[in-house]
Structure formats: C-alpha cells, structure tokens
Amino acid sequence: MSEQTMTLDARLGLDKYNIDEQNSHIAIDQSCCQVCEGKPCLTVCPAEVYRLVEEETVARYENCIECGTCQIACDDLGEGGIDWQPPEGGFGIRYRYG
Amino acid sequence: MDKFDVAIVGAGPAGSTAAYLLAKAGLQVVVIERGKSAGDKNVSGGLIFSRIFNEVYPEFWEDAPVERAIRGHGLIFLGDGSSTTMDFRDDEALSPPYNAFSVLRSRLDPWMAQQAEDAGAMVIRGYTVDELLLEDGRVIGVRAGEDELPADVVVVAEGTRSQLLKKAGLRKEFDVKDVSLGIKEVIHLPEETINERFQCNSGEGMAYTTVGSTAGIGGGGFLYTNQDTLSVGVVVKISSMYESGLQPHEVLDVFKSHPTIARLIQGGDVVEYAAQTVHRGELHLIPQLYGSGYVVVGSAARLILNNVLTLRGMDLAVSSAASASQAILQAHEQGDYSAASLAAYQDHFQKSAVYQDMKTFKDTYSLLENPRLFEAYPNLVNDVLGDLFSVKTEPGKKVFPTLRKNMKGNVSMLEMVRDFYQIGRGLVL
C-alpha cells in the first residue's frame, strides 16, 4: 500500500537553491562539538546538513533549507557550537511552493 | 530624504500587511526581504482564515492567488493500520466571506508584497538585514551589509527564527521544548484526481488534521488540498523527535505510509520538500511586543495558535500587523515613537479576536505534553470501533467492556479520567 519511500537526497534534489559558492552561512566551533555527547544536529536537521567526518562536525550548508531547528537544538540540547546566520541576501533555498 | 518613517524587516504576511496599511495611510515605508522574491524562504501548512484577512484585504479572494476554498475540515485519528475520521463539510464555507483557503506561500507572499508596493511602500528584495541599529536602548533603524537604513520605527517581521531580536538582546533564548518542527511535502496530482478523491469541485477543497502515526512523537499531521497539489506534513516536538532518534523525513514517512494517508496521496509526485520551525504559541512565550522605536509582529513574536483542530499562524500575523500599524499611525501623528507610545500596539492586539482565541485555548498546550494523546488514544478509538463493527463467531460486548478490554495495558482508567479532564479544560469548557 505504501508508496516507495524517497531518499532524503532525492527529496533535496527537488528543491531549488541559489548557492553561495563563496561563503557558508553556518559556522561551527569544533571545541564545542568535541565535548558534545548527544550531537543533536546529526539527527534533528531535516536536510541532514550536519555530518561527522573524521570526528569533526561538518556542515553541508548548501543543502540547508533554513528551518532554524539546528540552532535551537544545538543551543539547548547540545553545546552551542553552531552559529547559524541567514545566508547573504538572495542566496540559499528558494521555495517554489512553500 | 534619508530617513524612512517605517523600516520593516521581512515581506511575509506580517511585514507586508504592516507595509500595506502604513503606506496606504501615507507614511514612507521600506520593506527589506532577504528572499529574491517574497515567499522564497517561507513555508506554511498552509491555511489562511478568511474573515481575518478580509478585514485588511476586503474580498481578497477575487484577486489573491488562493488555491482552494476550504469546504470542510476533518480530524483523523490514525491507529495502527486503522483510522477514524470526523469529516465536517459545510457548503456555506463556499460563499463569501468563506472560512478558509489553502495557499502556497511562494504565490501568496508575492501578492501581499505587491499590495504593499501598490500602496506606495518600497520593497527591497534580496537583502538580508544583519542587525537592528540601537542607540541608548532605542531602535533607530536597521543595517543590511554596509547600508544603514534609519527609521522612526522598525517593524520586526523576520519570522520564526527572530535572529535580530536575539542579537539585539530583545528576546529570551528559545527553549527546545517550546518549538516544533514542521516537515512538509508538496505532492502533485491532477486537479480532477483531487476533486474525485476528496469529493470536491474545482476551487473547493478539504483540510485534514491528524493525530497518531507520528512514531509516538508529540505532534500531529496535516493534509490540505491545493489546486493540483496536496500539502502533506507533520508538526512534531523537536525534543521528542530527538529522543526518538528518528530523522525528520523518517517521521514524515511513518505518517505518509499509514494506509489512510497513503491512499489519499497515492500516485502523486513529490515536487517539493520543506521544513520550518513552529513555535508553541503559548501566551507566556510571547516576547516583549514593543519597545522604544520598534514593534514585533507575526511569527517573530511567536504568535501561533494550535488547538489540535487548527494550526493558525498567517492570520495572527495579519492581525498583529494591523494592531501594530494602528499604534504606529498614532505614534506618527504625535511624533512620539517611545515605548510608552508604541505600547498602544499591545493594547490593540490584546483586544483582537486572535489574541482572545490564544487566551481561550491556552490550556490546550499541556495536551501536547501528554504522550498518550499521540499513540494510545488514536489506537484506542480505532480498536474500540474495530471491535464494535466486527461481527465474530463468539458473542460481542457492549461499548464499556469493549473499551475496558482495549484499554488494558495501554491506559488506566485513572489516566483516562485525568486526560479527559485535561482535554475538557483545553478544548471544551
């Protein structure tokens, strides 16, 4: 009965972005991440922006759909290592439906 | 002229409404929107409630890009493979002033920004406001990149993240327990298929909210009909989702794969995946709404109303912007933009129907803390009805023994009495 589920990447592939190739709008303070046990960013982000690569938290900022979840979760459940600022004007997600 | 009367951050429903009303009254208004087009960054379920919009935009339905007039609302209890639906339909909601419309923000928001522009406001798109300019505790304008825009009053309509208020120290930190995440897909289906599936004519639609099938995570689901798409999603508590270990799209998949939902979206093509944080909407979470030289409107002020049956945001945005505009006009006439003068915004807003609604449903929020509501009860409703409807070879039982049988191991009588009292306080009396 259930439809075939789509992978997250396939879903993100449907979305339209105007990517800022020069600047990331997400800054990560690794010293916070290193002591962060729960690492909520790895699971709560709906675009799986955050990944652990060789024990460092990296942000694939180009996938960000700008929902705001990571900042709230990191500040409150994590160690506050994420500094999320809105992308420069005109850059980032461009919802075609919303 | 270097100084604007009013600088507005964000061209969503709140910002554009304030811009429209203030420009119409003759003030010099500038709106700064970070999207290349208004609506680029915005996500809603989304329904707008007509009578509130109609007060600001008379007969907007003649002109605004609405999807379908909502003919009926449904509440679905999703059990384990089963479902029970309360399906309310009223054709009176199909003639002016209507009750609600489904909308897509990438269409609605540009229209609202255009109304503001037509009224004389300047809308600057593709610029991110970096901070509020403060001087002796007074907001005196905004800064976007290297540009400073001084204004007599700043309308903070930056939406749910409210970064500017945070940066300026004008709001408290958010508690993760007070914020949910909405995860949504827009699914394309031919218009005729939607008409048949939801028993509607073109231009008329249905709005369903659901309880259950969110993997036991506090929250609920929604399914709204647009012209040739469906808006399908869940709104779940971030903290509970984190505890569950599930990723947001996995929670959405649990919902979408419930047989009742799966049948409604069957054969559709997902055309967009979106997410947005949603505040809890409790009165005590509303930040200071005004101060010297600024007001806060819409989602930036955490104005959301969730009473299980409806989740409202855009009409609260419009209504708060209307109240704020009224106060700003008075402040402009008196040349006094002090906190004491702008306090009139709060007075106006507290008299509005939307604020009264927030007050009326204030006890609903404790329901969101009750895990039994999202798993045990939707299952119970369905299991009891399942037993009552099915004829077996052994003799059946009346309602109460059937209820007791299905409660066993899931919910105690005492819990149920307490929960019904809680539901009663929140929604009934």
Image (cartoon, helix red, strand yellow):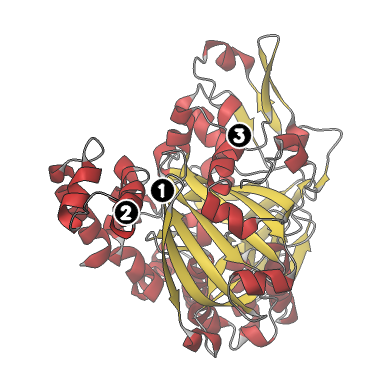
Mark nearer the viewer, 1 or 3? 1
Q: Quadrant of residue A29?
A: top right
Dot 3 and dot 2 within a common chain: no
Give the Cα distance between marks 3 and 2. 33 Å
Q: Is residue B337 above or below residue B212?
A: below
Residue at the far top in the pictured view: A54
Q: Residue at x 49, y 19 (%)?
A: A38
Q: Position of residue B319 (x, y in %)?
A: 48, 72
Q: Position of residue B412 (x, y in %)?
A: 17, 40
Q: Is residue B99 above or below residue B278?
A: below
Is residue B348 visible from the viewing direction of this image?
A: no
Q: Residue at x 75, y 35 (%)?
A: A9
Q: Are marks 1 and 2 in contact (CB under 8 Å)?
A: yes
Q: Secondary structure at mark 1?
A: loop
Marking on residue B381 = 2
Q: Position of residue B169 (x, y in %)?
A: 49, 42
Marking on residue B79 = 1
Is B344 left or right of A56, judged from the image as shown?
A: left
For label 3, the residue is A45
Q: Secondary structure at mark 2?
A: helix
Q: Position of residue B267 (x, y in %)?
A: 71, 56
Q: Is residue B321 above or below residue A13?
A: below
Q: Amino acid at mark 1?
A: Gly
Q: Residue at x 32, y 43 (%)?
A: B376
Tell which subunit mark 3 falls on: A
